Amino acid sequence: MTEAIWSLLGVVLGFVLAESAQWLKQLKVRFRLRKSLVAELQSITRMVPSKVDVLSQAESHFKAERVMPTQSTHFPREIYSRVIIEAPEILKDWERDCLHIIHERLRVVDASMDSMEERFLSINSSYSGEQAISAAVGSINDLKEALSQTSELAQSVISGASIDVYALGNQS
């Protein structure tokens, strides 16, 4: 009987050790993903001034009836995608909301900047130069505002300060 008890204890101990090792491994992965996510958000916030500068230069060119390519390096979004797929539980609800808004806006900003020159030329050929300039400047202002709000959201996730993404921009 004691041999059976020792055998059972060995099985239980083996199970506990295996589960503990698996739990520690998952904890390590979650920690690394969280750290990588913060680094990605910091990179994004450092890129925003450069994007705003490109948009400001483009605005000056459009107002002078010249065209300037606005394509630039795209914002990183790889870690965000990994976290959402591999470990969404490491995010609080408000962080998940912020990250979704951040990365969707970044996708739109990148796509808009990639096609801005083409849209300007298309509007200019179909309508008038004034309408093309007005549309481009309006788009640029919208993109600058989106980048400003995106930086604020990214900083909130980095610092851990909860922010209501649905109230952002609706404040007077």
Image (cartoon, helix red, strand yellow):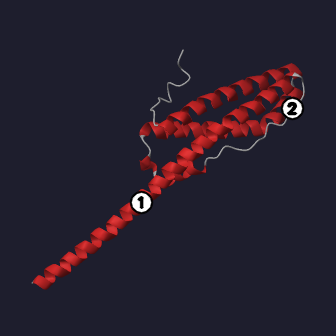
Percent x, y for residue 10?
23, 78
Residue extending furthest toward the left: 1
> Which residue bears the numbered disc 2?
121
Residue 21 sits above or below residue 110 on the image = below
Asked whether 122 or 58 is in front, the reply is: 58
Gap between marks 1 and 2, in whole Å?
A: 51 Å
Which residue is painted at 23% across and 73% down in the image?
A: 12
71 or 121, nearer to the observer:
71
Please give the residue where the numbered disc 1 appears in the rendered image.
Answer: 26
Q: Amino acid at mark 1?
A: Gln
Q: Is residue 6 above or below residue 101?
A: below
Image quarter for residue 59? Answer: top right
- Mark in front: 1 vs 2: 1
Identify which amino acid the numbered label 2 is placed on.
Leu
Q: Around disc 1, counting alpha carbons within 10 Å, would you say few (fewer than 14), some (14 to 19), or many (20 or more)?
A: few
Total numbered labels placed on residues in the image: 2
Q: Secondary structure at mark 1?
A: helix
* Residue at 32%, 66% in the rendered image: 19
Label located before the other in sequence (1 or 2): 1
134 vs 79: above or below: above
Q: What x and y, as percent, mark residue 152?
A: 56, 30
Q: Looking at the rendering, which quadrant does residue 130 occupy?
A: top right
**Left or right of 14, for residue 115:** right
Looking at the picture, how far across and down is residue 30, in whole percent?
Answer: 45, 54
Which residue is rendered at x = 74% and y = 27% of the image? 140
Is 156 or 136 nearer to us in this picture? Answer: 156
Quadrant location, the N terminus: bottom left
| Residue 51 seen in this snapshot | yes
Residue nearer the viewer, 156 or 86:
156
